[in-house]
Image (cartoon, rainbow, N blue to C red):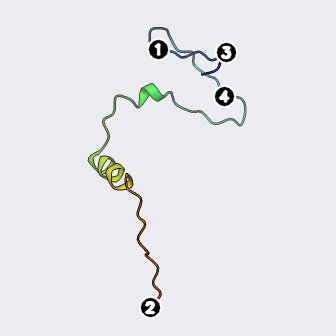
Amino acid sequence: MYEDEHVNTGDEPTQTQVPAPGEATVPEIEQDETIAPRPEEEIADVLRAEPDTADHSRNG
């Protein structure tokens, strides 16, 4: 973390960021933290945990 960086621990109100013209809006992470992951997301995470090093080319 940098000296001038501040982390909101949830005890203080967050400020609503108004994007500049042409700048995309990004939702706060906290809005998504209450949604449980879907089962297929957890399965995908497990399958991605080990890299697939098999040769999948069709040279034959």
Q: Amino acid at mark 3?
A: Asp
**Are dots 4 and 2 in contact, CB under 8 Å?**
no
Q: Quadrant of residue 36?
A: top left
Q: CA distance from mark 2 to mark 3?
A: 59 Å
Q: Position of residue 31 (x, y in %)?
A: 43, 27
Under tag 3, what secondary structure?
Answer: loop
Under tag 2, what secondary structure?
Answer: loop
Under tag 1, what secondary structure?
Answer: loop
Residue 42 horizontal side relative to residue 28, left or right? left
Q: Position of residue 33 (x, y in %)?
A: 38, 29
Q: Position of residue 53 (x, y in %)?
A: 43, 66
- Is residue 30 shown above or below 52? above
**Are dots 1 and 4 in contact, CB under 8 Å?**
no
**Are dots 3 and 4 in contact, CB under 8 Å?**
no
Q: CA distance from mark 3 to mark 4?
A: 21 Å
Q: CA distance from mark 1 to mark 3?
A: 16 Å
Q: CA distance from mark 2 to mark 1?
A: 58 Å
Identify the residue position indicated by label 1 in the image: 9
Q: Amino acid at mark 4?
A: Pro
Instruction: State the residue in front, 57 or 31.
Output: 57
Q: Earlier in the sequence, mark 1 or mark 4?
A: 1
Image quarter in which the N terminus is found = top right
Identify the residue position indicated by label 3 in the image: 4
- Is residue 29 shown above or below 50? above
Instruction: Report the mark closest to the observer, 1 or 4.
Output: 1
**Are dots 2 and 3 in contact, CB under 8 Å?**
no
Instruction: State the residue in front, 52 or 15.
Output: 52
Measuring 41% from the left and 71% from the top, which residue is drawn there?
54
Q: Residues within 10 Å of mark 1 (few under 14, many from 20)?
A: few
The numbered mark at residue 60 is 2
